[in-house]
Image: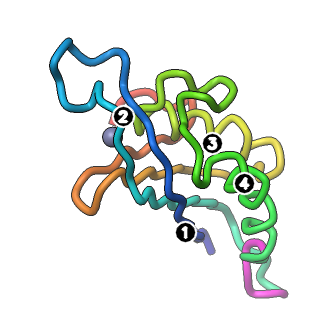
Amino acid sequence: MYVRLVKSFGFEAAHFLPGFPEGHKCRRMHGHSFRVDVVVAGEMDPVVGHLIDYGEIKKAIEPLHEKLDHQVLNQVENLENPTSEMIAAWLWERLVTTLPLLAEVIVHETCTSRCHYQGPEHIGP
Ligand SMILES: [Zn+2]
């Protein structure tokens, strides 16, 4: 049985987006209550009846949450241009080493705006 598990977490942070055109509101320093969904997927163990422990996902997230929460994201190493897309890729690179079943990282910048990222090998829709 193939399943997808989702573990969500949130963090509060400030950023500005230097790649946006001069005068664009996103170039100004501002903050968001970001929400992230970490998705793992695979064939579950039929005996145990689950894929992996949600606690394992939480453990993988914790050190990254520490690096992002209440920070100016532009000052986080390798996150100088912290768009939702770049945050998703940053999280993917760091989560995939401990979560080989990682299938998707979704970064919600607001309640209505989010980025879905399925890793560098996933091309197209
Ligand atoms: Zn923003």
Tag 4: amino acid: Glu
Q: Which is nearer the eye, 77 or 112?
A: 77
At 20% from the left and 13% from the top, the residue drawn is: 21
**Depth order, front residue of 31/103:** 31
Q: Considering the whole magenta stretch, tell me its main secondary structure.
A: loop
CB contact under 8 Å: marks 2 and 4: no
Quarter-of-image position of residue 34: bottom left
**47 drawn magenta:** no
Secondary structure beneath dot 1 equals: strand
Determine whether label 3 and label 1 are within 8 Å by CB. no
Q: Which residue is mark 1?
A: 8
Q: Give the labeled residue for mark 2.
A: 29
- What is the distance, in whole Å, between disc 2 and disc 4 at their CAs? 21 Å
Q: Earlier in the sequence, mark 3 or mark 4?
A: 4
Q: Work out which residue is located at the far left of the displayed protein and give it.
A: 23
Q: Helix, strand or loop at disc 2?
A: loop
- Residue range highlighted in magenta: 48-52
What number is the disc on residue 91? 3
Q: Would you identify the image quadrant in which residue 27 lies? A: top left
Disc 2 crowd, CA 10 A, few/some/many (<14, 14-19, 20+): few
Q: Of discs 3 and 2, which sits in the foreground?
A: 2
**Which SS class for mark 3?**
helix
Q: Is residue 40 above or below residue 78?
A: below
Asked whether mark 1 and ligand 1 are closer than 8 Å, the reply comes as: no
In the rendered structure, which amino acid carries the disc numbered 3? Leu
Q: Which residue is mark 4?
A: 66
Labels 2 and 4: the sequence-earlier one = 2
Query: Coloring scheme of the render?
Result: rainbow
Q: Are marks 3 and 4 in contact (CB under 8 Å)?
A: no
